[in-house]
Image (cartoon, grey):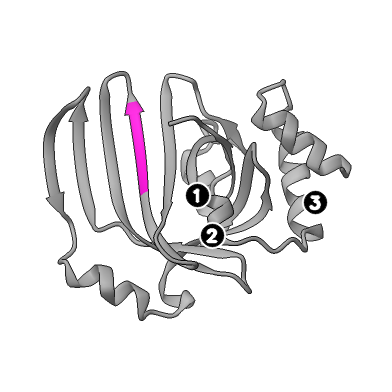
Amino acid sequence: MNNSAAVLEQAVQQTGVSPQDLITALQCGEKTSKDRCGLSVLAGAWRLQFITGTKKTRKQAGVVLGAGRYLPKLIKIQLHYQVTTDDQGQVENSVAVGALQLTLTGPIKFWSKARCLAFDFTQLYINLGKLTLYKKRIKPEVADQDFYGQTLKEQAFFKYFWVTEQGIAARGRGGGLAIWARTKS
């Protein structure tokens, strides 16, 4: 295991890696990654641990985001990928604070040569515990099928460069870096 991979492993295990050391490891891991992975490896639930944001969001967020930030334990941001074919499936992106949870869902497509997972959000749910307070499509049903006909340049995506059983790291289309740890739910 190279040094950047070791730092990334420590970060998903929450063993006190400084934000600057983690950013350096993410950038190094991104430059040296040659691994190919399939969508099935990304299947499951992943909790967001750390984000850098884009240059634009860092400028807007200033001190709050800085160059990068671990997410507080009070806020739980989670991705859940479900695979339906070799390169397609569904995503749930949820943000929870206590019992209140906002969830966006929609289709995903994995572009294996580019190691990019494209996604779109077409439905919105707001729950309080197990009670659904709000549920609505935010795009028409045809948007789910139209998504699969689009090119990668037309889609939002994460370009994964570090994928293990314990954690994943990617650069978003907007340029920000993020790392997630696998969760049980």
| N-terminal label among 1 and 3 | 3
Q: Residue 153 versus residue 143: which sits nearer the camera?
A: 143
Res. 128 image quadrant: top left
Left or right placement of residue 31 versus residue 158 in this view:
right
Q: Which residue is mark 1?
A: 43
Q: Residue at left 31%, top 18%?
A: 98
Quadrant housing the C terminus: top left
Mark 1–mark 2 distance (CA, rounded to whole Å): 7 Å
Q: Residue at left 43%, top 66%?
A: 85
User: Which label sits on residue 180?
Assistant: none
Quadrant housing the N terminus: top right
In the rendered image, residue 138, in percent from the top left (x then y), is placed at: 18, 57
Q: Which residue is mark 2?
A: 39
Q: Is residue 15 above or below residue 110?
A: above
Q: Amino acid at mark 3?
A: Cys
Mark 1–mark 3 distance (CA, rounded to whole Å): 25 Å
Camera-near label (3 vs 2) is: 2
How crowded pointer 1 is (Cα within 10 Å; few <14, some 14-19, many 20+) is rated as some
The answer to whether residue 54 is visible is no
In the rendered image, residue 163, in percent from the top left (x then y), is placed at: 66, 49
Left or right placement of residue 143 versus residue 131 in this view:
right
| N-terminal label among 3 and 2 | 3
Q: Is residue 153 above or below residue 3?
A: below
The segment highlighted magenta reads 92-96
Q: Which residue is mark 3?
A: 28
Q: Amino acid at mark 2?
A: Leu
The answer to whether residue 80 is visible is yes
Tags 1 and 2 touching, CB below 8 Å = yes
Q: Residue at left 42%, top 34%?
A: 77
Helix, strand or loop at disc 2?
A: helix
